[in-house]
Amino acid sequence: MSMIAFLLIILTLLGLGYQIVKKLRQMRRRQQIEFEGYCLLVKIKKADEQQEYPTGIFQQGEQEWEWQIPFSMQTLSTPVRGYVVVNQQKVSSFYQ
């Protein structure tokens, strides 16, 4: 009987440790986010010789930003409104 209790305690501690590590990773990821919110994607500048990656011009009210976008976003027709998450001047996700 004591062996089963010992295994349950070990499993509980492992589960608790896993949850703590998971929460710490989420908090660290949250700190890296530069911008998160709804924006209007106004214009897309495609990659060329001068610019090695595509960028998008985003607006929110009177504010305007230019961030690097993934190549898959080049096919979007502008203007389009969506929820954007930006990390290190790069769009990590964009939901319409």
Image: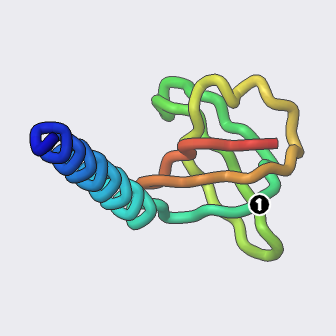
Q: Percent from the top left, x then y, of residue 70?
A: 57, 31
Q: Percent from the top left, x then y, of residue 55?
A: 60, 41
Q: Percent from the top left, x then y, of residue 25?
A: 33, 54
Left or right of 5? Residue 81 is right
Residue visible at 16% across and 40% down in the picture: 1
Between residue 24 and residue 86, name the one nearer to us.
Answer: 24
Whether 96 is drawn above or below 70: the answer is below
Whether 80 is drawn above or below 19: the answer is above
**Disc 1 residue crowd, few under 14, some 14–19, many 20+, Cα 10 Å:** some
Q: Give residue 62's quadrant in the image.
A: bottom right
Task: Count all numbered tags in the image, as a single digit.
Answer: 1
Left or right of 9? Residue 59 is right
Residue visible at 51% across and 32% down in the picture: 53
Dot 1: element: strand
Left or right of 8? Residue 91 is right
Q: Amino acid at mark 1?
A: Tyr
Left or right of 71? Residue 2 is left
Looking at this view, name the residue that lies furthest to the bottom: 62
Q: Percent from the top left, x then y, of residue 65?
A: 64, 61
Residue visible at 74% across and 43% down in the picture: 95
Residue visible at 56% across and 45% down in the picture: 91
Between residue 41 and residue 49, name the one nearer to us.
Answer: 41
The residue that disc 1 covers is 38
Q: How is the image coloured?
A: rainbow
Between residue 89 and residue 30, name the one nearer to us.
Answer: 30
Looking at this view, name the residue that lies furthest to the front: 1
Q: What is the quadrant of the C terminus in the image?
A: top right
Q: Give residue 71's quadrant in the image.
A: top right
